[in-house]
Image (tube, helix red, strand yellow):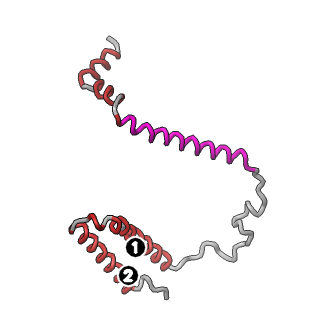
Amino acid sequence: MDINFFVKNFLSSNGYVEQLNMLKHSSMQEEYMSIFIYLCFAIFLALIIVVLSYFLVTQSPETEKLSTYECGFEPYGDTRSQFNIRFYIIAILFILFDIEIIFLLPWCVSISQLNLLGFWSMIEFLVELGIGFIYAWCVGAIEWS
């Protein structure tokens, strides 16, 4: 008794051979083959670009290029100065409201095909967005003073 006997019996008893044969000739394989070819081409092209850019570029760094700041100016003081917390709050609020506004585009495109539930759920979303904006405005998170 060898390992092939056990593998053959295991595969035939569980129906894996039939499933494997079905996958060999299925339309799923044809659909995913184009994606696989595209992925292989993209990886090949990326590797070619990286390798060629490494070998074809003339690498002659200057002292200015190797300095801490490429602009050539020496720093005027400590580079670890603290920023006002308002920069971060404005950035976070911008990201939040920007992502929420992105949800409006698909709604506007498909508004004629929506039923009442889809329409009023988006109206509720807009009301919540407005309440959040009014709250941020009343708290003073948007004001720069």
Structural crowding at the residue carrying mark 1, measured as other residues with C-alpha within 10 Å and reported as few (<14), some (14–19) or many (≥20): some
Which amino acid lies under the numbered mark 2 shown in the image of this protein? Ala
50 versus 76 height, above or below: above
Tell me, yes or no, whether the highlighted magenta stretch contains residue 70.
no
Q: Give the percent coordinates (x, y) of residue 143.
A: 45, 86
Q: Quadrant of residue 20?
A: top left
Label ID, residue 136:
2
52 versus 107 height, above or below: above
Tell me, yes or no, whether the highlighted magenta stretch contains residue 35.
yes
Q: Give the percent coordinates (x, y) of residue 99.
A: 40, 68
Q: Quadrant of residue 64?
A: bottom right
| Tag 1 residue | 97
Mark 2 or mark 1: whose residue is earlier in sequence: 1
Question: Which residue is at a point 22% across and 66% down the rendered structure image?
Answer: 115
Question: Which residue is at a point 33% across and 67% down the rendered structure image?
Answer: 107
The nearer-to-camera label among 2 and 1 is 1
Question: Which residue is at a point 31% across and 15% down the rendered structure image?
Answer: 5
Structural crowding at the residue carrying mark 2, measured as other residues with C-alpha within 10 Å and reported as few (<14), some (14–19) or many (≥20): some
Q: For mark 1, give the secondary structure.
A: helix
Which SS does the magenta portion mostly show?
helix
Q: Give the percent coordinates (x, y) of residue 140.
A: 41, 86
Q: Give the percent coordinates (x, y) of residue 136.
A: 38, 81
Q: Are marks 2 and 1 in contact (CB under 8 Å)?
A: no
In this view, which residue lies farthest toward the top? 1
Residues in magenta?
28-57
| Cα–Cα span, label 2 and label 1 | 11 Å
Which amino acid lies under the numbered mark 1 shown in the image of this protein? Phe
Q: For mark 2, give the secondary structure.
A: helix
Q: Nearer the viewer, residue 134 or 27?
A: 27
